[in-house]
Image (cartoon, rainbow, N blue to C red):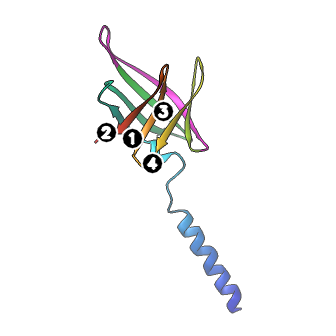
Amino acid sequence: MYRRACALIAIAASAALGACGKPAGEEFVGKWANQKTKETVEISKNGDGFLLKDTTVNGFTGPMTSTVPATYEKGVMQVATGFGTMNVGYDRTHDVLIMPTMGGSVELSRAK
């Protein structure tokens, strides 16, 4: 009887503690900016997926904004583009979003 009670308490405790963690991909949610390139990215939860709103500033046309759906899988945010799937990474140590570009990648810091 004692053993059974201890097992039930252990199961209940693990279930309670397991529910305390952040949902998958939650670290990506928020507003991100790169002062050098004047790019901002706002990521929000959208049902089971996410929306990624990217605003870049072009010297000729001014700000250009695009919003695309994204999914979270295996630690990266995935966005389908006309050129294939783009993987957006997150550097937890520096709280930096890593966005791929045509020439490599750009880092965006969490906007305050």
Q: Residue at x 61, y 80 (%)?
A: 9
Between discs 3 and 1, the one toward the N terminus: 1
Q: Are marks 3 and 1 in contact (CB under 8 Å)?
A: no
Q: Are marks 4 and 1 in contact (CB under 8 Å)?
A: no
Q: Where residue 86 appears, x then y in whole percent? A: 56, 28
Closer mark to the observer between disc 2 and disc 4: 4
Q: Residue at x 64, y 74 (%)?
A: 11
**Was residue 76 drawn as part of the magenta stretch in this picture?**
no
Q: Where residue 21 appears, x then y in whole percent? A: 51, 59
In 3D space, how far apart are the residues under numbered discs 4 and 3 (Cα atoms)?
Answer: 20 Å
Q: Nearer the viewer, residue 110 or 3?
A: 110
**Was residue 58 drawn as part of the magenta stretch in this picture?**
yes
Could you say whether the residue bearing mark 1 is in a helix, strand or loop?
strand
Label drawn at residue 51: 3
Which residue is label 4 attached to?
A: 92
Disc 4 marks a residue whose amino acid type is Arg
The span picked out in magenta is 57-74
Which residue is label 1 attached to?
A: 30
Could you say whether the residue bearing mark 4 is in a helix, strand or loop?
loop
